[in-house]
């Protein structure tokens, strides 16, 4: 039995496919309807003027010219040529004009357009049979020439106007694309400048301060004889050195301008993180997938790191319980701590640690939740999908 969610997904998928097919059918039906209307007009143009004693070949040629309107989109030049006999020896003037207009729309100033225009003009100027044409007066020849120019010129003018409009639309679309590209380049340049400024500040200020801390810890380590103080100095020096390494990596990423965050610690380095922290920890790792994306592994590491830092700051002496497990295509991280067991000194806090973790989870398509526990502690739950 399928789940209700699966059924709903199938219904949504079917509705989406139905809408897609309907949107695809709509232009096809409009095109077919428009072509049918043009063929009907061309047939009426012939049928309403054909005389009762017309030659059969003239009727057949005119009918072929009307049928050629159907093929004007794929073969505009051949369709125009197909209307010439029906226009010269018959009455398919409108069919010739329709095909010539499509030829001008597709080919614009191509030689085929001018050949088609000359043929249509000739068909309007010359009367069939030629004996009747030779009997016309010079005034009738001039009038036929004027009407020939109109019959051949009007479709070309309309077709070139439509083609020019389409070309202008394409140019405007290209211009809009170019402007969007320029905006992106400008935004990238602004981001690169801001990243370079942040890199300078991090290197000049933060790196300098951490270096001084490491140096002071080294001096304390060399001068002290107390075991407790010596261990504390070693821990401070080790943490300062590791922070400098990560800071240099971040500065390199900022200066390079790459979207990649560079090499970052992952779940495999949690043991070293836990050993270096001054917080009692119970760690449980279950059902890890064979392949873990680097971004997800780094996010899990940063989640645990920030949570342990908060426990050390706000709940000194409390035990932290960390549970990491893979389930349903996602990696779940849960960090829970008890209430503070001893008073602690007020440590500086930027107030952005949990906010940053929530933003990281959102960018990865996951979720992030925080809540108080019944015993006065604090719980953090993060979920990171693995299929991104």
Image: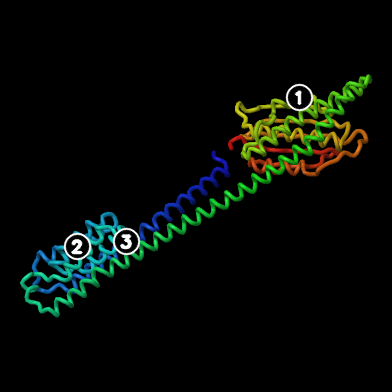
Which of 14 and 39 lies nearest the eye of the viewer?
A: 39
Establish if 295 lies above or below 12. above
Per the image, label 3 sits on a secondary structure element best described as helix
> Residue visible at 54% across and 53% down?
180
Quadrant in which residue 306 is drawn: top right
Eyeballing the image, is 385 above or below 51? Answer: above
Instruction: Mark 1: give few (<14), some (14-19) or many (20+) Cα within 10 Å.
Output: few
Residue at 58 percent of width and 36 percent of height: 387
Q: Residue 271 sits in which quadrant?
A: top right
**Mark 2 sits on what residue?**
83
Q: Name the element at disc 1.
A: helix
Local crowd at mark 3 within 10 Å, few (<14), some, or many (≥20)?
many
- Most distant residue in the left direction: 131
Residue 328 location, x and y as percent? 62, 34
Q: In the picture, residue 85 is in which quadrant?
A: bottom left
Say whether disc 3 or disc 1 marks the residue closer to the N-terminus: 3
Residue at the spot of label 3: 105
Left or right of 246 in this view: 320: right
The numbered mark at residue 326 is: none
Q: Confirm or deny contact between disc 2 and disc 1 (CB under 8 A).
A: no
- The image shows residue 48 at horizontal and vertical percentages of 19, 74
The one of 331 and 266 positioned closer to us in this rendering:
266
Which residue in the protein does label 1 denote? 272
Most foreground residue, 57 or 269: 269
């Amino acid at each position: 039995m399928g789940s209700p969610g699966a059924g709903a997904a199938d219904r949504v998928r079917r509705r989406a496919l139905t809408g897609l097919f309907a949107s695809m059918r709509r232009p096809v039906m409009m095109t077919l309807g428009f072509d049918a209307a043009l063929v009907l007009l061309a047939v009426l143009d012939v049928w309403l003027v054909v005389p009762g004693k017309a030659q059969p070949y003239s009727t057949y040629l005119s009918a072929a010219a009307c049928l050629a309107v159907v093929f004007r989109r794929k073969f505009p030049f051949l369709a125009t040529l197909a209307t010439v006999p029906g226009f010269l020896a018959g009455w398919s003037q409108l069919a010739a004009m329709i095909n010539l207009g499509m030829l001008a729309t597709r080919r614009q100033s191509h030689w085929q357009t001018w050949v088609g225009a000359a043929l249509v003009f000739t068909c309007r100027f010359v009367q069939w049979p030629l004996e009747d044409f030779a009997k016309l007066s010079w005034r009738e020849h001039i009038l036929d020439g004027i009407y020939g120019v109109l019959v051949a010129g009007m479709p070309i003018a309309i077709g070139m106007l439509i083609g020019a409009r389409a070309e202008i639309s394409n140019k405007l679309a290209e211009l809009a694309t170019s402007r969007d590209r320029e905006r992106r380049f400008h935004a990238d340049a602004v981001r690169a400048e801001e990243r370079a400024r942040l890199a300078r500040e991090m290197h000049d200020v933060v790196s300098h301060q951490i270096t001084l801390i490491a140096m002071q810890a080294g001096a304390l380590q060399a001068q002290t004889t107390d075991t407790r103080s010596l261990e504390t100095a070693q821990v401070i020096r080790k943490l300062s050195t590791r922070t400098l390494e990560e800071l240099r990596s971040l500065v390199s990423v900022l200066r390079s301008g790459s979207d990649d965050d560079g090499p970052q610690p992952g779940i495999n380095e949690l043991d070293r993180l836990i050993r270096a922290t001054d917080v009692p920890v119970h760690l449980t790792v279950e059902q890890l997938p064979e392949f873990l994306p680097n971004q997800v592994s780094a996010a899990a590491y940063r989640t645990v790191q920030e949570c342990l830092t908060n426990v050390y700051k706000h709940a000194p002496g409390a035990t932290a319980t960390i549970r990491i497990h893979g389930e349903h295509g996602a990696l779940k991280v849960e960090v829970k701590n008890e209430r503070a067991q001893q008073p602690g000194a007020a440590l500086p806090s930027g107030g952005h640690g949990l906010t940053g973790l929530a933003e990281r989870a959102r960018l990865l398509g996951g979720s992030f939740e925080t809540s108080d526990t019944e015993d006065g502690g604090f719980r953090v739950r993060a979920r990171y999908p693995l299929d991104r």
